[in-house]
Amino acid sequence: MDVIHSVAALRERLQRVPNNVFVPTMGNLHAGHIQLINIAKPRAACTVVSIFVNRLQFGPREDFERYPRTLEADCEKLRAAGVDVVFAPDEKEIYPEPQTFVVEPSELQHTLDGAVRPGHFRGVSTVVLKLFNMVAPHSAIFGKKDYQQCLVLTNMVRQLALPIDIILAETVRADDGLALSSRNTYLSPDERREAPRLYQQLCRARDELVDGARDYQRIELDVMAELAHHGWKPDYIAVRRQSDLQSPVNGEQRLVVLAAARLGKTRLIDNIEANL
């Protein structure tokens, strides 16, 4: 496995095996990332994983400085998973000058997580486009836990006519249902025991939809109230269309329930699809 820190060295390495599949990450890897790699490996001769904590997608009061950076341990996991190339640049390698050219996503960037984190999806789209240009993969793997991000990036690839196949992987969960996330390490022991409630409430909402409930606002408010009763501070609970995350009308068959809520100082996101 080659660990590469510069764009020039990355491009030189990938010229030798240009048939590559790409898994972008911010590091602090867990079993969910390894599942993305397992999906990626059969698809190309060369599996590339990037590790880069992208300042552009963090707000001024978010956790950029304390986001876990565990490169050595990450590389051990990636080597064991059979990754071919790890691209681990520093900030000046990705942004050698102020990034004045940015990717401005559609109105989708201003709803749900985008409303709570202004500029987040602009930062995500910009760095992913730069990484795509550096790696030049034929396909890239993303996890559905970041459902809105997946839709933003899929739309970006389609509208900019990038020759990249976006593959979406199901969320990997702990035995108690909690979606795996690097930020789970912020949870105290008591918070970790409480954290599965988020997924439990999403399942409850999904089951109501499957059973025929169509009062979407009532479903959202019930979940928010239940979480708040147990000490959570919900940012949103939303029943939306899978295709564009717009509010559904009666007769919609493919819905998704999305959630973001704070438990103590930790912000968790999750979602569950409801195919009626």
Image: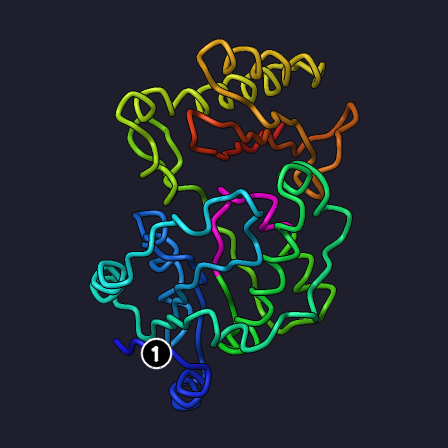
Label 1 belongs to which residue? 4
* Number of dots carrying numbers: 1
> Bounds of the magenta span?
141-151
Asked whether, in this view, residue 1 is left or right of residue 239, the answer is left
Viewer-side residue, 117 vs 238: 117
Viewer-side residue, 148 vs 88: 88
Vertical comparison of 243 with 41: above or below? above
Asked whether, in this view, residue 21 is left or right of residue 57, the answer is left
**What's the residue at 57%, 16% (across, down)?**
224
**What's the residue at 37%, 76% (across, down)?**
46
Q: The residue under label 1 is which amino acid type?
A: Ile
Asked whether, in this view, residue 161 is left or right of residue 179, the answer is right
Residue 152 on the magenta segment? no
- Residue 176 drawn at (x, y percent): 31, 26
- Residue 172 drawn at (x, y percent): 38, 41
**Residue 147 appears in which quarter of the rendering?**
top right
**Residue 238 appears in which quarter of the rendering?**
top right
The C terminus lies in which quarter of the figure? top right
Viewer-side residue, 158 vs 231: 231
The N terminus lies in which quarter of the figure? bottom left
Vertical comparison of 131 with 210: above or below? below
**What's the residue at 48%, 74% (across, down)?**
92
- Residue 137 drawn at (x, y percent): 50, 74
- Residue 247 drawn at (x, y percent): 75, 30
Q: Secondary structure at mark 1?
A: strand
